Amino acid sequence: MTTATTRTAPVIGAVGTAHTRVEGRDKVTGAARYAAEIPFAELAHGWLVVSTIARGRIRSIDAAPVLAMPGVLSVLHHGNAQPLESQYVGPMGTPDPTLQIFQHDRVPHAGWPVALVVAETSEQAREAAESLVVEYDLAPHDVAFADGHPGTYVPESTPRAAAEKVKGDLAAELDASAVVVDAEYTTPEEHHHPMEPHAATAYWDSGRLEVVDSNQGSIYVAQELAQLFSLDASAVRVRSEHVGGGFGAKGTRPHQVAATMAATVLHRPVRVVLTRRQMFSLIGYRSPTAQRVRLGADADGRLRALHHQGLNQTSTVHEFVERSADVARAMYDAEAHHTVNRVVRLDVPSPTYMRAPGEAPGSFALECALDELAERCGVDPIVLRARNEPAVGPVSGLPYSSRKLLDCFEVGADRFGWAERDPRPGLRRDGRWLLGTGTAAASFPTLAGPSTAAVTAEADGTFTVRITAADIGTGARTALTLVAADALEVSPDRVTVRIGDSDFGPAMLAGGSAGTRSWSWAVTLAARDLREQLALGGHVPPEGITARSDTTAAIGALPPRERHAYGAQFAEVAVDVSTGEVRVRRMLGIFAAGRIVNPLTARNQFVGGMIWGLSMALHEEAVRDGATGTHVAPDLAGYHVAANADVPLVEADWVDDPDDEDPVGIKGIGEVGIVGAAAAIANAVWHATGVRHRHLPIRPDRVL
Ligand code: MOS
């Protein structure tokens, strides 16, 4: 199958109808076991010890007293740990030395793993870990992130990602512009903190490494562990049945590596669970960003020049680029475009992908700048966006697979009541509250990763799907059940979907908003093949009949296009002028994001993203202390996230936008919900108060 136009109307029609989660009952009754809850005989518990200094060397680790403590089995550190493969390359094709734990005495940042204490019980391991004396030789550190840092550089472009893109003559177009907006925006360090902390149990079984984990892609973790421990890929199996949130944080992290090291030494299962506090330095986070946006336009708001530059921090051990400027490349037409993502290496933990990496902070800057331009031109913000709607990719020149951004604005404006809005700021008052409304656009790339799937017709008339998918709370297992049912033309209750086992073969991870699209593609192809085999008639043997698929060729044959999901975000805020408090009163998001497989869980995804946008706009900020290089209050008391009382009526809906390449018509909905949400709120705060807030979060002290 190499053509891109194979979508056929479903006969059963499970896709598109609301289904509760197939494992929902198990989850709410506690029958669903998460990684750290699964019992093992002879289980030992590892507790990580992380550095308390921001840079330097380990002078000594005094393991002897700790080894004498009750229940303690082992203390692993750089002096005794087994060597890891140093040529290890991460799933994104670049080396990631973040996983090279206990390989040297260097401390590159605060919270770096320096030892693992293993004991009979978790409590004993913790007690011993907290007693372990580690002495350091301190070296000076630099954790001061700011635009203008002398260490700033433009990273090398990769085949997947260009650091910089230039079209046209930016300076000339800015000179020719009647109106120029030139503004700087910042977003702080933000953390994912999935509800379920990272946890892995590793053990050896008949020469095979088995890991029971909580991750976004078991095949990725298996392949990475195989590389790191110089094992044959077939000698590693990773399972991840239920996952309590991921958001980009649940890839391969130091805890799986540490658990594997200890299981190898002790010849018994070893479990390592991260603490909430350790998660601040060990699982990645969203880098702070400093962005500059320059927009040059004619008097009517038609863009001539679009300049967006981003800066993010990365660690000294790993280069991670938060691609804030990328979102501009496909959003708005302009004669000249210049977009660049820059980085600076600091003595901080390695940042990573966090929901809508790049687009979340990037859209805040770009969509606020658009609002400033609308104000300057005296043009309605939605009209301004329509005026700059591109026919083809503004930089790439490629056609769009579909682009229903303006449909989203039209439906959203109607539902939100945008037509009645007086554009002048600072006019509406409700007691001590100033009221305002704002809008912003959203987009996120539509991706697909090669995947394999197997679908079995069982002798009892049911069907079993096997694919190394991950359900990180999104409802992916349920979505795949509906997709398989339609492809098999049977009722969903005859379909069992098994996921989260690397033995099921290569498949896309739950990331890049591409999980459901990628997996559904593979499941559909295998199911169709199976249906053809069954149509030939004959008896189903006891072991069943299995059809397999691999979408590598189909996805590789896709022609280059601009592929994105879109959305229009609306927010109404109230600003207390005496305390500086901002309260969001309502939010509405209308999305064009491909065919919606399960409206129930899809709405959850969109609303969840939008709430995160609210949280980003008003609450979230990890503060790093320059003197020590460590976080101030690294826990969920010190790191504020939006709580129920902060969240008003949040509505999400969508327009019909089936993709014409994916066999089910899916685009992907995981990340677009957060994109633009913070900008819509910031724009609403301006409308309420007449003051632009270009630095997140919009805290009371910044409002006053
Ligand atoms: Mo997502 S940040 O691609 O897991």
Image: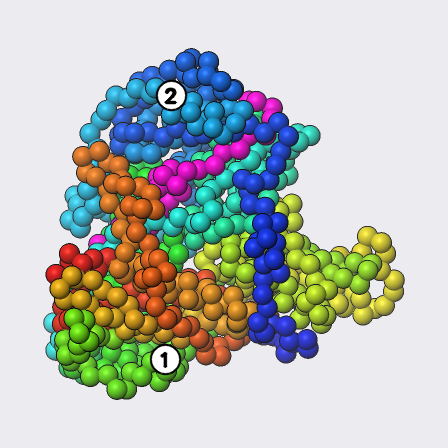
Residue 38 sits above or below residue 431 on the image: above
Give, as a three-letter code, the residue at label 2: Leu
* Residue 186 falls in image quadrant: bottom left
Name the residue beneath numbered marker 2: 132
Q: Secondary structure at mark 1?
A: helix
Numbered tag placed on residue 314 in the rendering: none
Residue 629 higher or lower than 427, as above or below: above
Tell me if label 2 and label 1 are in contact, CB under 8 Å: no
Q: Quadrant of the C terminus?
A: bottom left
- Residue at left offset 60%, top offset 72%: 15
Question: Which residue carries the number 1 mark?
Answer: 412
Q: Could you tell me which residue is drawn at 46 percent across and 71 percent down?
A: 593
Badge nearest the viewer, 2 or 1: 2
Q: Quadrant of residue 161?
A: bottom left
Residue depicted at x 17% and y 74%: 431
Residue 53 located within the stretch drawn in magenta: no
Residue 282: in magenta span: yes
Depicted 640 relative to depicted 481: above or below? above
